[in-house]
Amino acid sequence: MKNLKRYLRPVGIALAVIGVMLALGFVERTADRAPITDLQVTVDGVEGIHFIDEMAVRREILDQGIAVMGSRTGDVDITNIEDRLRSIPCVAKAEVYHTMDGALHARVKQRIPIVRVFNLDGSSYYIDQEGWTMPTSTNYTARVLVVTGQLNEPGAKNGVYSVFATDSIENAFRSDDIHRLATFITADPFWNALIDQVVVTADGEFELIPRVGAQRVLLGDGSALQQRFEKLKVFYDKGIPKADWRRYSRIDLRFADQVVCTKRTTL
């Protein structure tokens, strides 16, 4: 009897596993035949960023001539819907799935821009946190760091692409350096509050324009950011009282271990 129980136990386990698999298969087949009766949309992003909303996502899913509502869940091309949502320039990620209650769920994550770049011809575009370009929107303007100057960047014309491209032609542009500088500035509460504009000179160097003080801060080619900003912070903290920030028209950080200042002739 003991030996019989020893053999029956694994047989029982195997039968139970088979039963569960059959039940899951039945549930899956039943779910695939259930009609879509609801569309649930979630838009993730940072508070205050409104490049896309739930209504825009709904329109993209429902107004493309593809039957969704009332269709069987197994007949809805989820991959196609995800691809369409991801093709929206301000969308970083999109996930679409259905549940057994007949609801189709669409979850969209917005891109988060950290800098807006203006070319010489007036065209402009954003670069997001991850280094992807994105066009501007007629519905919403993000309040981010602005970069102007001697620029002819392709981001305003070429849609969404990574600024870290390895192509030699792309490497001739400055979007990657601009993203690196914007990332550094926005990551620090002090610099993020103080600096709202950067100018790229004809020599390809960066000049910072603080919100207060009305001076130009010569940063250089964008290298050694940590060291140069540390020098500037020490200069602001110890070199001049905050009440006298207007005393200088130019602060030059390009030289090693020193800050070179030009005094304003009139205040």
Image (spheres, rainbow, N blue to C red):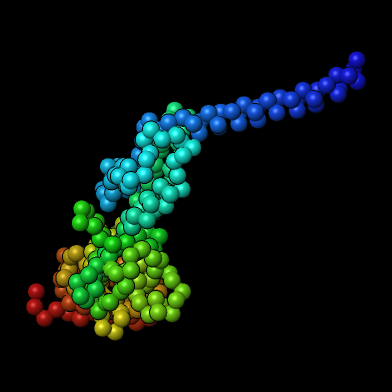
Above or below, 3 against 217 in this view is above
Spot occupied by residue 203 in the image (x, y as percentages of width and height): 29, 84
Q: Residue at x 39, y 65 (%)?
A: 161
Q: On the picture, is 60 further left or further right than 130? A: left
Residue 118 picture quarter: bottom left
State the residue lying farthest toward the top.
1
Spot occupied by residue 75 in the image (x, y as percentages of width and height): 46, 39
Q: Residue at x 40, y 79 (%)?
A: 169
Where the N terminus falls, by quadrant?
A: top right
Q: On the picture, is 56 further left or further right than 103? A: left
Foreground residue among 172 and 36: 36
Res 225 seen here: no
Callout count = 0
Res 165 seen here: yes
Q: Residue at x 33, y 57 (%)?
A: 89
Q: On the picture, is 13 further left or further right than 186? A: right
Spot occupied by residue 59 in the image (x, y as percentages of width and height): 29, 44
Spot occupied by residue 208 in the image (x, y as percentages of width and height): 25, 71
Residue 43 picture quarter: top left
Above or below, 223 against 237 in this view is below
Above or below, 187 against 103 in this view is below
Foreground residue among 140 and 243: 140
State the residue lying farthest toward the bottom.
203
Where the C terminus falls, by quadrant?
A: bottom left
Q: Residue at x 30, y 79 (%)?
A: 205
Above or below, 68 against 9 in this view is below
Residue 257 picture quarter: bottom left
